[in-house]
Image (spheres, rainbow, N blue to C red):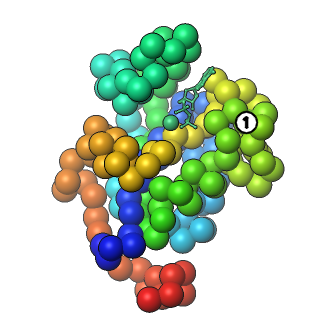
Amino acid sequence: MNNQTERTLVLIKPDAVQRGLVGDIISRLESRGLNISGLKIIKIERTIAEQHYRVHKNRPFFPKLVDFITSSPVVAIVFQGRNAVEVTRNTMGQTNPSEATPGTIRGDFAIDIGRNLIHGSDSIKTAEEEILIFFTGNELLDYEMSTDPWITEP
Ligand code: IDP
Ligand code: MG
C-alpha cells in the first residue's frame, strides 16, 4: 500500500443480504475503483456487535441495532484504495436513507434509518479498529490490479 492508499470496513447488513442486494452494493464500490482486500459472510455474535457499535451504547436505538445486525448473516468486506474511507461513505449516502441523495446506495434502495443496508467506517482510525474486529492479518491481501494506473494517476 502506498501512503495515499487506505483500507475501510464495509458490512453489507442483514437487510441487504436478505433482499439480494449484495452483488449490487459490491459492484458500486468496485466500480468506483476500490479493490477487495478481504471478504467473508458471517453471522455476527452479540458481543462482537456490541463492541463494533460501542460508540452508540447509550443511544435509545442501541438494543434494536444490535438485535438487527445479529439477526441474519452479513457480508464483511475490507475495501482498499485511494481515499477509501471517504469514497465509501459518499457512495453509501446519508445515515437516514430518507435524506440520502439518489445515486447513493441508501438513496436508491432504502427509506428507513433502521434498515439502511450498509455500514462503512467513518474515519481512518475507526477503520483500523473495526477491521481488527472482523479480520485477521492473513485474511487481508495487498495486491496490484493491472487497472490501477487507469483508476488513480500514479
Ligand atoms: P452510519 O451507519 O451512517 O455511520 P451511525 O450514526 O454510526 O451511522 O449509526 C450507526 C447505525 O445505527 C446506523 O447505520 C443506523 O442503522 C442506526 N441508527 C443511527 N441512528 C439511528 C436512529 O436515530 N434510529 C434508529 N437507528 C439509528
Ligand atoms: Mg457510523
Q: Residues within 10 Å of mark 1 (few under 14, many from 20)?
A: many
Residue drawn at x 37%, y 44% is: 126
- 18 and 2: which is toward the camera: 2
Q: Position of residue 57 (x, y in %)?
A: 42, 17
> What's the residue type where badge 1 is placed?
Pro
Q: Is residue 44 visible?
A: no
Residue drawn at x 37%, y 30% is: 52
Residue drawn at x 47%, y 61% is: 84
- SS for callout 1: helix
Location of residue 144 (image quadrant): bottom left
Q: Is residue 21 above or below residue 137?
A: above
Q: Position of residue 64 (x, y in %)?
A: 53, 13
Q: What residue does disc 1 label?
A: 97
Image side of residue 125 versus residue 95, left or right? left
Q: Is residue 122 visible?
A: yes
- 94 and 35: which is toward the camera: 94
Quarter of the rendered image showing ligand 1: top right
